[in-house]
Image (tube, rainbow, N blue to C red):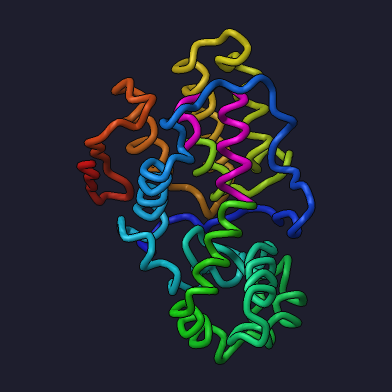
Amino acid sequence: MAPGNPPGTGGNPPAPGTPGPAVPPPGPAIPAGGTGLDSPRLKDIAQQLVSSAENSSLDWRAQYTYIEDIHDGRGYTGGIVGFTSGTGDMLQLVKHYQALKPGNALARYLPALEKVDGSASHSGLDPSFVADWHRAAQDAAFQQAQNDERDRVYFNPAVEQAKADGLHALGQFAYYDALVMHGPGSDRLSFGGIRAAALAKAKPPSKGGDETAYLNAFLDARRAAMKADSSHQDTGRVDTMQRAFLKAGNLSLATPLRWTVYGDSYTIQS
Protein backbone atom coordinates (compact mmCIF):
# COMPACT_ATOMS: atom_id res chain seq x y z
CA MET A 1 0.00 0.00 0.00
CA ALA A 2 1.40 3.39 -0.97
CA PRO A 3 2.27 5.87 1.78
CA GLY A 4 -0.78 7.81 2.87
CA ASN A 5 -3.26 5.36 1.39
CA PRO A 6 -6.29 4.88 3.61
CA PRO A 7 -7.52 1.63 5.09
CA GLY A 8 -10.54 -0.28 3.98
CA THR A 9 -13.22 0.08 6.60
CA GLY A 10 -14.28 2.39 9.35
CA GLY A 11 -17.05 0.54 11.17
CA ASN A 12 -18.12 -2.95 12.15
CA PRO A 13 -19.91 -4.75 9.33
CA PRO A 14 -23.13 -6.68 9.84
CA ALA A 15 -22.78 -10.37 10.60
CA PRO A 16 -23.67 -12.78 7.81
CA GLY A 17 -27.43 -13.19 7.46
CA THR A 18 -28.28 -9.93 9.23
CA PRO A 19 -29.15 -6.60 7.64
CA GLY A 20 -26.44 -3.98 7.97
CA PRO A 21 -26.87 -0.37 9.05
CA ALA A 22 -24.93 0.96 6.07
CA VAL A 23 -27.82 2.25 4.01
CA PRO A 24 -31.34 3.55 4.58
CA PRO A 25 -34.28 1.78 2.95
CA PRO A 26 -34.09 2.28 -0.81
CA GLY A 27 -36.44 4.58 -2.66
CA PRO A 28 -37.67 4.23 -6.24
CA ALA A 29 -34.98 2.59 -8.32
CA ILE A 30 -33.92 3.64 -11.81
CA PRO A 31 -33.59 1.04 -14.55
CA ALA A 32 -29.95 -0.05 -14.63
CA GLY A 33 -30.00 -2.06 -17.85
CA GLY A 34 -26.54 -3.46 -18.54
CA THR A 35 -24.72 -0.31 -17.51
CA GLY A 36 -24.94 -0.49 -13.73
CA LEU A 37 -21.80 -0.97 -11.68
CA ASP A 38 -22.96 -4.54 -11.06
CA SER A 39 -22.53 -5.44 -14.73
CA PRO A 40 -19.45 -7.70 -15.00
CA ARG A 41 -17.37 -5.21 -16.99
CA LEU A 42 -18.07 -2.21 -14.77
CA LYS A 43 -17.69 -4.23 -11.59
CA ASP A 44 -14.20 -5.20 -12.73
CA ILE A 45 -13.45 -1.54 -13.50
CA ALA A 46 -14.70 -0.59 -10.03
CA GLN A 47 -12.31 -3.10 -8.49
CA GLN A 48 -9.42 -1.67 -10.50
CA LEU A 49 -10.28 1.86 -9.35
CA VAL A 50 -10.41 0.80 -5.71
CA SER A 51 -7.15 -1.12 -6.06
CA SER A 52 -5.39 1.90 -7.54
CA ALA A 53 -6.18 3.81 -4.35
CA GLU A 54 -5.83 0.99 -1.82
CA ASN A 55 -2.85 -0.84 -3.30
CA SER A 56 -1.27 1.38 -6.01
CA SER A 57 -2.08 -1.25 -8.62
CA LEU A 58 -4.85 -2.04 -11.10
CA ASP A 59 -4.33 -5.76 -10.51
CA TRP A 60 -6.98 -6.16 -7.85
CA ARG A 61 -6.85 -9.96 -7.92
CA ALA A 62 -3.24 -9.80 -6.74
CA GLN A 63 -4.54 -8.25 -3.51
CA TYR A 64 -6.09 -11.42 -2.11
CA THR A 65 -2.70 -12.01 -0.50
CA TYR A 66 -2.13 -8.43 0.69
CA ILE A 67 -1.90 -7.91 4.45
CA GLU A 68 -0.04 -5.49 6.73
CA ASP A 69 -0.51 -3.21 9.71
CA ILE A 70 -0.58 0.33 8.31
CA HIS A 71 -0.66 1.75 11.87
CA ASP A 72 -4.03 3.44 11.57
CA GLY A 73 -5.44 1.98 14.78
CA ARG A 74 -7.33 -0.79 12.98
CA GLY A 75 -4.82 -3.63 13.37
CA TYR A 76 -4.11 -5.70 10.28
CA THR A 77 -5.47 -4.55 6.91
CA GLY A 78 -5.75 -7.22 4.24
CA GLY A 79 -7.38 -8.46 1.08
CA ILE A 80 -9.16 -6.93 -1.88
CA VAL A 81 -11.02 -4.19 0.02
CA GLY A 82 -8.82 -3.80 3.07
CA PHE A 83 -10.61 -6.01 5.61
CA THR A 84 -9.32 -5.05 9.05
CA SER A 85 -8.83 -7.02 12.25
CA GLY A 86 -9.92 -4.07 14.36
CA THR A 87 -13.30 -3.39 12.74
CA GLY A 88 -14.89 -6.81 12.54
CA ASP A 89 -14.98 -7.38 8.80
CA MET A 90 -11.83 -9.53 8.84
CA LEU A 91 -13.43 -11.64 11.55
CA GLN A 92 -16.58 -12.08 9.43
CA LEU A 93 -14.40 -12.92 6.43
CA VAL A 94 -12.57 -15.70 8.26
CA LYS A 95 -15.87 -17.02 9.64
CA HIS A 96 -17.22 -17.20 6.09
CA TYR A 97 -14.04 -18.91 4.93
CA GLN A 98 -14.51 -21.45 7.71
CA ALA A 99 -18.06 -22.07 6.50
CA LEU A 100 -16.83 -22.62 2.95
CA LYS A 101 -13.82 -24.74 3.97
CA PRO A 102 -13.77 -26.00 7.55
CA GLY A 103 -10.35 -26.46 9.08
CA ASN A 104 -8.63 -24.01 6.78
CA ALA A 105 -5.31 -22.29 7.49
CA LEU A 106 -6.96 -19.31 9.23
CA ALA A 107 -9.60 -21.08 11.30
CA ARG A 108 -7.37 -21.31 14.38
CA TYR A 109 -7.24 -17.50 14.54
CA LEU A 110 -10.98 -17.03 15.02
CA PRO A 111 -10.76 -16.73 18.85
CA ALA A 112 -7.97 -14.15 18.53
CA LEU A 113 -9.90 -12.16 15.90
CA GLU A 114 -12.89 -12.12 18.26
CA LYS A 115 -10.69 -10.71 21.04
CA VAL A 116 -8.92 -8.02 18.99
CA ASP A 117 -12.11 -6.73 17.34
CA GLY A 118 -12.36 -3.03 18.15
CA SER A 119 -8.64 -2.59 18.78
CA ALA A 120 -5.28 -2.36 17.03
CA SER A 121 -3.96 -5.39 18.94
CA HIS A 122 -2.19 -8.33 17.29
CA SER A 123 -2.67 -10.48 20.40
CA GLY A 124 -3.05 -14.12 19.42
CA LEU A 125 -2.33 -13.34 15.76
CA ASP A 126 1.42 -12.89 15.76
CA PRO A 127 3.82 -14.29 14.78
CA SER A 128 2.25 -16.56 12.13
CA PHE A 129 -1.02 -14.91 11.03
CA VAL A 130 0.51 -12.99 8.12
CA ALA A 131 2.25 -16.06 6.72
CA ASP A 132 -0.92 -18.12 7.06
CA TRP A 133 -2.94 -15.36 5.34
CA HIS A 134 -0.53 -15.48 2.41
CA ARG A 135 -0.92 -19.24 2.27
CA ALA A 136 -4.71 -19.03 2.45
CA ALA A 137 -4.75 -16.46 -0.36
CA GLN A 138 -3.67 -19.19 -2.80
CA ASP A 139 -6.86 -21.11 -1.95
CA ALA A 140 -9.80 -20.55 -4.30
CA ALA A 141 -12.17 -20.88 -1.32
CA PHE A 142 -10.51 -17.96 0.47
CA GLN A 143 -10.60 -15.87 -2.68
CA GLN A 144 -14.32 -16.68 -2.97
CA ALA A 145 -14.82 -15.74 0.67
CA GLN A 146 -13.22 -12.34 0.03
CA ASN A 147 -15.41 -11.81 -3.02
CA ASP A 148 -18.54 -12.81 -1.10
CA GLU A 149 -17.85 -10.54 1.87
CA ARG A 150 -16.90 -7.64 -0.39
CA ASP A 151 -20.26 -8.00 -2.12
CA ARG A 152 -22.34 -8.60 1.01
CA VAL A 153 -20.96 -5.82 3.16
CA TYR A 154 -19.82 -3.20 0.66
CA PHE A 155 -20.55 -3.60 -3.04
CA ASN A 156 -24.17 -4.75 -3.06
CA PRO A 157 -25.48 -2.32 -0.40
CA ALA A 158 -23.67 0.60 -2.08
CA VAL A 159 -24.93 -0.16 -5.57
CA GLU A 160 -28.47 -0.85 -4.36
CA GLN A 161 -28.65 2.46 -2.52
CA ALA A 162 -27.07 4.39 -5.39
CA LYS A 163 -29.58 2.96 -7.86
CA ALA A 164 -32.39 3.86 -5.48
CA ASP A 165 -31.02 7.42 -5.40
CA GLY A 166 -31.13 7.52 -9.20
CA LEU A 167 -27.38 7.46 -9.74
CA HIS A 168 -25.55 6.06 -12.72
CA ALA A 169 -22.28 4.09 -12.64
CA LEU A 170 -20.06 6.91 -11.38
CA GLY A 171 -22.37 7.63 -8.48
CA GLN A 172 -22.66 3.93 -7.72
CA PHE A 173 -18.88 3.77 -7.60
CA ALA A 174 -18.68 6.87 -5.38
CA TYR A 175 -20.99 5.16 -2.89
CA TYR A 176 -19.03 1.90 -3.06
CA ASP A 177 -15.65 3.55 -2.55
CA ALA A 178 -17.02 5.54 0.39
CA LEU A 179 -18.48 2.43 2.00
CA VAL A 180 -15.18 0.56 1.56
CA MET A 181 -13.21 3.33 3.25
CA HIS A 182 -15.60 4.61 5.91
CA GLY A 183 -17.60 1.50 6.70
CA PRO A 184 -21.32 1.07 7.38
CA GLY A 185 -23.00 3.18 10.00
CA SER A 186 -24.90 6.40 10.53
CA ASP A 187 -22.37 8.58 12.39
CA ARG A 188 -20.88 11.53 10.52
CA LEU A 189 -17.69 9.67 9.53
CA SER A 190 -19.47 6.55 8.23
CA PHE A 191 -21.16 6.04 4.88
CA GLY A 192 -24.65 6.77 6.18
CA GLY A 193 -23.53 10.04 7.74
CA ILE A 194 -21.76 11.12 4.56
CA ARG A 195 -24.86 10.41 2.49
CA ALA A 196 -27.04 12.26 5.01
CA ALA A 197 -24.77 15.32 4.77
CA ALA A 198 -25.06 15.24 0.98
CA LEU A 199 -28.85 14.93 1.12
CA ALA A 200 -28.95 18.01 3.36
CA LYS A 201 -27.27 19.98 0.57
CA ALA A 202 -28.79 18.61 -2.64
CA LYS A 203 -31.59 16.39 -3.91
CA PRO A 204 -30.66 13.11 -5.58
CA PRO A 205 -32.08 12.38 -9.03
CA SER A 206 -34.69 10.06 -7.52
CA LYS A 207 -36.14 13.16 -5.79
CA GLY A 208 -35.95 15.35 -8.89
CA GLY A 209 -32.45 16.70 -8.28
CA ASP A 210 -29.59 17.19 -10.69
CA GLU A 211 -27.21 14.22 -10.62
CA THR A 212 -24.02 16.24 -11.03
CA ALA A 213 -25.01 18.69 -8.30
CA TYR A 214 -25.88 15.87 -5.95
CA LEU A 215 -22.63 14.00 -6.61
CA ASN A 216 -20.65 17.17 -5.98
CA ALA A 217 -22.44 17.47 -2.63
CA PHE A 218 -21.67 13.83 -1.85
CA LEU A 219 -18.00 14.19 -2.73
CA ASP A 220 -17.82 17.38 -0.65
CA ALA A 221 -19.26 15.48 2.32
CA ARG A 222 -16.93 12.55 1.70
CA ARG A 223 -13.93 14.85 1.57
CA ALA A 224 -14.95 16.53 4.83
CA ALA A 225 -15.28 13.14 6.52
CA MET A 226 -11.82 12.15 5.32
CA LYS A 227 -10.29 15.37 6.62
CA ALA A 228 -11.94 14.77 10.00
CA ASP A 229 -10.14 11.42 10.33
CA SER A 230 -6.39 11.54 10.93
CA SER A 231 -5.85 8.35 8.91
CA HIS A 232 -7.62 9.70 5.80
CA GLN A 233 -5.94 13.05 5.25
CA ASP A 234 -4.97 12.46 1.62
CA THR A 235 -8.17 13.03 -0.37
CA GLY A 236 -6.72 12.13 -3.76
CA ARG A 237 -9.16 9.32 -4.47
CA VAL A 238 -11.91 11.94 -4.34
CA ASP A 239 -10.09 14.96 -5.79
CA THR A 240 -8.13 13.46 -8.67
CA MET A 241 -10.20 10.37 -9.43
CA GLN A 242 -13.93 10.69 -8.77
CA ARG A 243 -14.12 14.47 -9.07
CA ALA A 244 -12.12 14.31 -12.29
CA PHE A 245 -14.61 11.87 -13.81
CA LEU A 246 -17.48 14.05 -12.62
CA LYS A 247 -16.00 17.24 -14.07
CA ALA A 248 -15.62 15.43 -17.38
CA GLY A 249 -19.32 14.56 -17.28
CA ASN A 250 -18.53 10.85 -17.31
CA LEU A 251 -21.49 9.65 -15.26
CA SER A 252 -21.43 6.27 -16.98
CA LEU A 253 -17.72 5.56 -16.32
CA ALA A 254 -17.17 5.19 -20.05
CA THR A 255 -13.68 4.12 -21.05
CA PRO A 256 -10.98 5.10 -21.59
CA LEU A 257 -10.57 6.29 -18.01
CA ARG A 258 -7.51 8.28 -16.99
CA TRP A 259 -6.81 9.48 -13.47
CA THR A 260 -4.18 10.04 -10.83
CA VAL A 261 -4.31 9.04 -7.20
CA TYR A 262 -1.66 9.61 -4.54
CA GLY A 263 0.72 10.84 -7.24
CA ASP A 264 0.46 7.82 -9.54
CA SER A 265 -1.23 7.89 -12.97
CA TYR A 266 -3.49 5.15 -14.31
CA THR A 267 -5.42 4.32 -17.47
CA ILE A 268 -8.14 1.80 -18.22
CA GLN A 269 -8.55 1.57 -21.97
CA SER A 270 -11.58 -0.70 -22.17
Placement of 168 over or under 38, stated as above or below: above
Q: Residue at x 73, y 32 (%)?
A: 24
Q: Is residue 12 above or below residue 129?
A: above
Give the residue displayed 55% in from the left and 46% down from the top.
155
Residue 167 belongs to the span the image colors magenta: yes
Residue 29 relative to residue 35: left or right: right
Residue 145 vs residue 46, the one in the foreground: 145
Quick one: 245 or 121, which is closer to the camera?
245
Depth check: give the residue in front, 236 or 42: 42
Residue extending farthest to the right is: 18
- State which quadrant residue 9 falls in: bottom right
Residue at screen point 60% across, 14% down: 203
What is the x, y in percent for residue 232? 50, 50
Side (left or right) of 112 relative to 212: right
Counting from the top left corner in percent of width and height, residue 217 is at 52, 22
Q: Position of residue 110 (x, y in %)?
A: 71, 80
Question: In the image, 86: left or right of 223?
Answer: right
Q: Is residue 195 magenta?
A: no
Seen as rendered, the residue at the extreme top is 208
For residue 227, above or below residue 144? above
**Residue 85: x percent and y percent?**
63, 70
Magenta stretch, main secondary structure, is helix
Residue at x 37% of width, y 27% of height: 252
Q: Quadrant of the N terminus?
A: bottom left
Quadrant holding the C terminus: top left
Range of residues picked out in magenta:
153-173
